[in-house]
Amino acid sequence: PEAITVQELAQRMAEKAPAVIKALMGMGVMATINQTLDQDTAQLVVEEFGHKVKRVSEADVEEGLIGDEDDAGDLRSRAPVVTVMGHVDHGKTSLLDALRKTDVVAGEAGGITQHIGAYQVQLGDGNKITFLDTPGHEAFTQMRQRGAGVTDIVVLVVAADDGIMPQTVEAINHAKAAEVPIIVAINKIDKPGADPTRVRNELLQHELVVEAMGGDIQDVEVSALQGTNLDKLEEAILLQSELLELKANPDRNADGVVIEAKLERGRGPVASLLVRRGTLKVGDVFVAGAEWGRVRALVDERGQQLKSAGPAQPVEVLGLQGTPSAGDDFAVVENEARAREIHEYRQEKLRSKRTTAAPASLESMFSAIR
Ligand code: GTP
Ligand code: MG
């Protein structure tokens, strides 16, 4: 069934949220602005305001995109998706670069050749880890706000010679708010002034208790520069991901999130996607945010063309009609007509958002999508 938040409902009727809350109260329903209303309640409110109802909403669109829940029996283990965060200069980029070099496949295929916003490392034992290559609080916050929930684990980089700094604290707060487990990488242990114990003590002040101190936060002393203990860090990530029991159904239409997107000369709109579940295939029709496309080519971070990409796999996709935004969701749909419908519905929604001075007519805001 269709569900809608009080705020969304107010926006679509071009009414103020408190007025909607008041109307709900009059009906004996106590609701907050972010509360979700069921279809019948929403309809009563709409009628209360004297508007006509056409039951079409973003929720409706998304429900269509999300489709059925996967049966437990169809779920398969998938690689963890890891975001590296930390204070300026503590070595996030260096660590990502160093981890990238531990990929056993990259060695054979001639290394990683292009930046697609994320990459997957295959370890010697066959296990895989996906790293989001856009570390930075902005990207993370954006994705969190979108509720995309793409990050499974945060690796918090703390330079052993510098300790907890403001952005370290920010990163801790982001991870906590998103309820994403943290693994601490105490970096730069090669430096003369390195003091890992001090880092562990400082972490205590932020309620991060490492295992050595009786807590459940894993910490690993590393040197991104010298490549020290990268295997231990990867082991810690795999252990954490086992605890999380990360699973996805690979045998369904793909959905996931846009990591980055840009318009490239000669290639058209290009988006880096991270598949959340299902398998994305060449020829698939999909929507990404307010854009749509048909997969013309899939390219991995090594520049290799792929026929398909499964859960937790980052991939660059060609064939979009427009350029979506980072953090947008994407989903494969049944056909081009459906993709166009969603595209038009969302474009219209974007337009009505932009014109704050003159809100779009009720009719257009409720315009049918199917
Ligand atoms: P921003 O992206 O600017 O926030 O920095 P970052 O966290 O990505 O740090 P980056 O990897 O750029 O490293 C900052 C500096 O620290 C560089 O000069 C690195 O060479 C150095 N560095 C990173 N890791 C290590 C390490 O393990 N040991 C030593 N000695 N230096 C390191
Ligand atoms: Mg960096």
Image (cartoon, grey):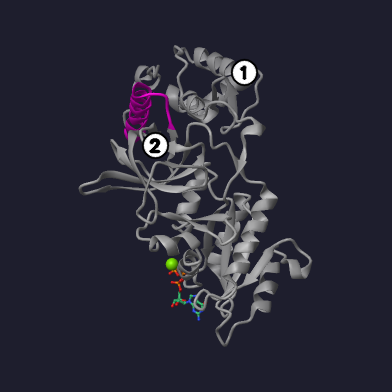
The residue at which mark 1 appears reads as 26
- Label 2 neighbour load within 10 Å: few <14, some 14-19, many 20+: many
Q: Residue furthest right?
A: 214
Q: Secondary structure at mark 1?
A: helix
Quarter assignment of residue 362: top left
Q: Nearer the viewer, residue 266 or 176?
A: 266
Q: Amino acid at mark 2?
A: Ala
Q: Which mark is residue 366?
A: none
Which is more toward the observer, 5 or 233? Answer: 233
Secondary structure mostly seen in the magenta stretch: helix
Left or right, residue 288 beside residue 263: right
Q: Residues within 10 Å of mark 1 (few under 14, many from 20)?
A: few
The quarter of the image holding the N terminus is top right
Rendered view: 78 above or below 21? below
| Residue under the point 64% across and 70% down | 220
Assess whether mark 1 and mark 2 are in contact (beta carbons under 8 angstroms): no
How far from the left and from the top, in percent, is residue 357? 32, 32
Q: Is residue 356 visible?
A: no
Q: Is residue 265 left or right of residue 242?
A: left
Circle 2 SS class:
strand
* Vertical arrangement, residue 241 with respect to residue 91, above or below: above
206 on left or right of 21 = right
Give the residue at x 43% y 62%: 108
Please, is residue 352 above or below residue 205 in the view? above
Q: Which range is magenta?
A: 332-356
Name the amino acid type tagged 1.
Gly
Left or right of 132? Residue 165 is right
Along the line of sight, which residue is nearer the eye, 277 or 342? Answer: 277
At which x and y percent is residue 115? 37, 57
Residue of label 2: 288
